[in-house]
Structure formats: C-alpha cells, structure tokens
Amino acid sequence: MVTTNLSNQEKLNLYFESKEKYYNDGNSSLTDSEFDQLENELRNLNLLNDSNEVVGYTSLHNKIKHWNPMLSLSKLQVNEESDEEFRAILKKIAEYDNSVIVE
C-alpha cells in the first residue's frame, strides 16, 4: 500500500487531503480502494474518531437541496448472506421493472 512508510500523522494528513480533493475537485491522489484501505487502517489504529472524523466534506460547489434527507451509510460490507438478500430484493423489483436484470 501507498502508506507503508508514512507516520500516523502523515497518514491522517493524506486521508484528509485526499478526502478534500475528492469532494472539491472530483479527484484524489488515492484510488477508491487505496482510500478505503487507508480509512480502515486509521480506524483500526483508533486514529479516526468523533472528534476528527468528518462525514463528507465542505464542497466549494453549489449545494443542491434534496427533497428527502440523504443520510450517510457506513461502507457496505458484502458477504454471502447479504448478497443473497440483495438478490432477493432485486428479483422482487424486477417483477415490476423490466429494466432491472438479475443474474
């Protein structure tokens, strides 16, 4: 991984810089996978907590008002059980919407 030779403070800096670039520029120096790995590493080291963790980021772009609240979700963890549940939900949706294809 990109962060193997970085101090914990450098990892935190990279995390917040990447997050800001992603939300404001649409780019980040890290891939999504690298960012997720870094975030998991920081959580495992207890370096991300309520006092320093920001959900999303303050964007420099115009805000759009949503009719319904757009709530944050934790990273989706997929396993065999959740995959089967998701497939069952998709099959129900596909009964009413032929644009949904379940393989």
Image (tube, rainbow, N blue to C red):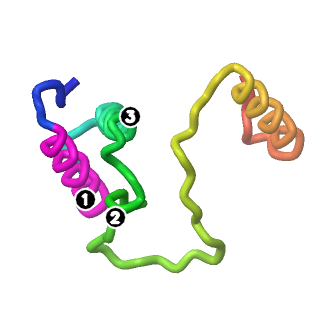
State the CA–CA distance, disc 1 to disc 3: 22 Å
Q: Which residue is painted at 30% across and 36% down in the image?
A: 38
Which label sits in the foreground, 2 or 3? Answer: 3
Determine if the magenta segment contains residue 21.
yes
Q: What kind of secondary structure does the magenta stretch mostly adopt?
A: helix
Q: Which residue is painted at 82% across and 43% down in the image?
A: 93
Mark 2 nearby-residue class (10 Å; few <14, some 14–19, many ≥20)? few
Mark 3 falls on what kind of element? helix
Quarter the C terminus occupies: top right
Of 93 and 73, nearer the camera is 73
Q: Which residues are magenta?
A: 8-24
Q: Residue under circle 3?
A: 44
Mark 1 nearby-residue class (10 Å; few <14, some 14–19, many ≥20)? some
Where residue 47 sits: x, y (%)?
31, 45
Mark 1 falls on what kind of element? helix
Determine if the magenta segment contains residue 45.
no
Circle on res. 20 = 1
* Cβ–Cβ under 8 Å for marks 2 and 3: no
Mark 3 nearby-residue class (10 Å; few <14, some 14–19, many ≥20)? few
Mark 2 falls on what kind of element? loop
Amino acid type, mark 3: Asn
Where residue 16 sits: x, y (%)?
24, 53
Q: Residue under circle 2?
A: 57
Q: Which residue is painted at 73% across and 32% down in the image?
A: 101
Taking the image as shown, residue 32 lies to the left or right of residue 78, namely: left
